[in-house]
């Protein structure tokens, strides 16, 4: 079977070269070509000219994966239970299945890994060489790819492929997944509709992008959304939306578009809402200025807790320059961010909201004042949140949006 598939693959590649087809763009034509090649092989097998195929459909899929997909990695990409794939070295390919890492049986060679990386980057317009040893890119099918080459790594290319499994386009979907209670979902929905600024925090793979996407589903249909990301990951269910991603410098070292530039440009595009996929560095200052200018927005940040996320947002803007001081940043954070939602990833791979914290709008002694709205008791299972004694800011916005804030908070209790 393996030899037969290799023979068909070789024949298909030769026809593709002769016809000048692009397998990445003309998938329909390649599928038709493979079907013809498999049928022709079957006819030869009936005459005894070649060994028969045990499963023609499986053979056609294997050839398609090799020619138009990512070869041995394609079955992992097609598996809906796998969320991330990473290669530490050619013989060690790992996956995260429902949040739990496992070593696969996939064995690659060094040339195969390099060829796969070249294929991944072919349509992205991004490059990888000694001058640019890191790359972030998006596959045509939406997966995010990150690659590091030696000598930054010890010996082998390090490859991460993060699949974006769209499981939630609204906060109600997260209730069905057990990520948060219905009452808390209703409160967060009201926060978005009312125009509060929301920061989503958590560790890597905790589900920050998924929650941000779900919250975006609560944006009123009449409003215009602008998203800014390093690479495209968000897929908000919004009618009027423009997504922008960063760009690497060209071979001459010019043409780079950083996240800070995207945030600034977004303000010129008549946004009713602004979403920044992930805040890492000085772009946090531009986001804070935008939020403080009356444009409701959301973003994500890596942090160990909601309060640590607030502290981090007070520190990151200082990277923007020596003229930016904490005397400016701390009160700006206090007034610009309204709610922080912190996510947790447990040992079993289950993602859920661990706490929801409000910023009261006050800062004293260089510390932003926060108030717990919903917390998870220490002995509670994932997805269980209890009402704390805090109260969110801007009750008037909830009233104008038609929500009874006291009722929302009371129903947020499990």
Image (cartoon, grey):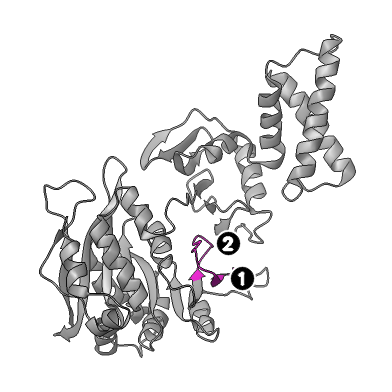
| Label 2: how many Cα within 10 Å (few below 14, some 14–19, many 20+) | some
Q: In the figure, residue 77 lies in which quadrant?
A: top right
Q: Residue furthest top?
A: 48
Q: Is residue 110 above or below residue 197?
A: above
Between 364 and 110, the one lying in front of the other is 364
Residue 237 on the magenta span: yes
Secondary element under disc 2, as helix, strand or loop, is: loop
| Type of secondary structure dominating the magenta stretch | loop
Q: With respect to residue 306, does 44 lie above or below?
A: above
Residue on which the image places disc 2: 132
Q: Residue at x 43, y 65 (%)?
A: 217
Q: Is residue 304 visible?
A: no
Above or below: residue 26 compared with residue 391: above
- Residue occupied by mark 1: 249
Residue shown at 72%/48% (left/top)? 24
For the point 38% across and 87% down, the residue is: 294
Cβ–Cβ under 8 Å for marks 1 and 2 = yes
Which residues fall within the magenta stretch?
228-249
Badge 1 marks a residue whose secondary structure is loop
Residue 201, percent from left and from top:
31, 63
In this view, 56 is above or below 17: above
Give how far across and how far down residue 381 sits, in percent.
Answer: 18, 46
Q: Earlier in the sequence, mark 1 or mark 2?
A: 2
């Amino acid at each position: 079977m393996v030899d037969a598939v290799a023979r068909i693959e070789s024949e298909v590649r030769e026809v593709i070269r002769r016809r000048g087809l692009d397998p990445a763009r003309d998938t329909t034509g390649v599928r038709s070509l493979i079907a013809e090649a498999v049928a022709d092989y079957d006819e030869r097998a009936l005459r005894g000219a070649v060994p028969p195929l045990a499963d023609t459909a499986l053979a056609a899929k294997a050839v398609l994966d090799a020619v138009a997909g990512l070869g041995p990695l394609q079955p992992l990409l097609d598996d809906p239970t796998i969320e991330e794939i990473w290669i530490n070295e050619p013989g060690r390919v790992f996956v995260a299945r429902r949040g739990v890492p496992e070593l696969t049986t996939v064995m690659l060679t060094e040339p195969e890994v390099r060829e796969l990386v070249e294929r991944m980057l072919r349509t992205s317009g991004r490059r990888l060489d000694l001058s640019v040893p890191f790359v972030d890119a998006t596959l045509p099918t939406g997966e995010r790819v990150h690659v590091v080459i030696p000598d930054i790594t010890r010996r082998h290319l390090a490859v991460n492929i993060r699949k974006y499994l769209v499981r939630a386009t609204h906060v109600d979907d997260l209730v069905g997944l057990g990520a948060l209670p219905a009452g808390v979902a209703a409160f967060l929905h009201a926060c978005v509709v009312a125009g509060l600024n929301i920061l989503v925090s958590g560790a890597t793979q905790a589900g920050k992008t998924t929650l941000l996407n779900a919250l975006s589903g609560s944006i009123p249909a009449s409003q215009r959304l602008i998203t800014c990301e390093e690479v495209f990951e968000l897929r908000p269910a919004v009618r009027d939306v423009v997504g922008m991603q960063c760009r690497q410098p060209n071979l001459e070292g010019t043409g780079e578009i950083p996240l800070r530039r995207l945030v600034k440009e977004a303000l010129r595009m008549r946004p009713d809402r602004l979403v920044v996929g992930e805040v890492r560095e000085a772009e946090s200052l531009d986001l804070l200025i935008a939020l403080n200018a009356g444009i409701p927005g959301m973003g994500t940040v890596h942090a160990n807790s909601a309060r640590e996320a607030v502290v981090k947002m007070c520190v990151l803007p200082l990277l923007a320059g020596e003229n930016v001081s904490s005397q400016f940043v701390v009160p700006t954070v206090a007034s610009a961010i309204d709610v922080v939602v912190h996510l947790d990833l447990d040992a079993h791979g289950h993602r859920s909201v661990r706490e929801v914290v409000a910023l009261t709008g006050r800062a004293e002694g260089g510390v932003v004042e926060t108030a717990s709205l919903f917390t998870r008791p220490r002995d509670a299972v994932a997805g269980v949140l209890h009402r704390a004694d805090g109260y969110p800011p801007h009750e008037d916005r909830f009233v104008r949006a038609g929500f009874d804030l006291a009722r929302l908070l009371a129903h947020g209790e499990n």
